[in-house]
Amino acid sequence: MVTSAQAAARMVAEDVPAGSRVLVIGGEGLRVALRERGLVPVESADEDPVAVVQGYGGPGMPWARFAEAAYAVGRGCPGTPPTRT
């Protein structure tokens, strides 16, 4: 079985080099999946991510997290999947 977090992490890992920073908007499972693929999850657009990945963060996910993703995308950072949206 493959989770949606694992699938998203695999897709990002196919498009960015290992060790790349990826802005995470979602739960811990997504962070774990990115780390398993050799990527570095970050929390802020100010950390110069090369991609943004969004997953389920629960009903209490603050809107500020989505705003952070918008800031990163506005700066030219692609969303997930970077080359297939």
Image (cartoon, rainbow, N blue to C red):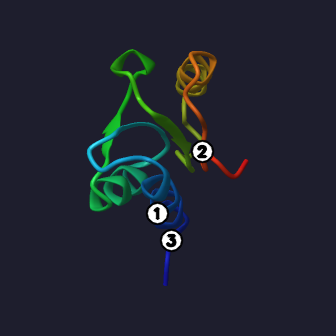
Q: Residue at x 54, y 35 (%)?
A: 61
Q: Residue at x 30, y 50 (%)?
A: 18
Whether residue 60 sits left or right of residue 49 in the image: it is right
Is 47 placed above or below 18 here? above
Mark 3 residue type:
Thr
Mark 2 residue type:
Pro
Q: Can you identify the residue that label 2 sits on? A: 82
Q: CA distance from mark 2 to mark 3?
A: 19 Å
Is 24 placed above or below 7 here? above
Q: Residues within 10 Å of mark 2 (few under 14, many from 20)?
A: some
> Residue 73 appears at what percent x and percent y?
60, 24
Mark 1 residue type:
Arg
Q: Can you identify the residue that label 1 sits on? A: 10
| Dot placed on the residue nearer the N-terminal end, 2 or 3 | 3
- Indicate the secondary structure of the residue bearing disc 3: loop
Numbered circle sitting on residue 19: none
Numbered circle sitting on residue 3: 3
Q: Residues within 10 Å of mark 1 (few under 14, many from 20)?
A: some
Whether residue 45 sits left or right of residue 73 in the image: it is left
| Dot placed on the residue nearer the N-terminal end, 1 or 2 | 1
- Indicate the secondary structure of the residue bearing disc 2: loop
Whether residue 24 sits left or right of residue 35 in the image: it is right
In the displayed orientation, state which residue is furthest to the bottom. Answer: 1
Q: CA distance from mark 1 to mark 2?
A: 12 Å
Tell which of 4 and 72 is nearer to you.
72
Is 63 placed above or below 79 here? above
> Residue 37 appears at what percent x and percent y?
32, 60
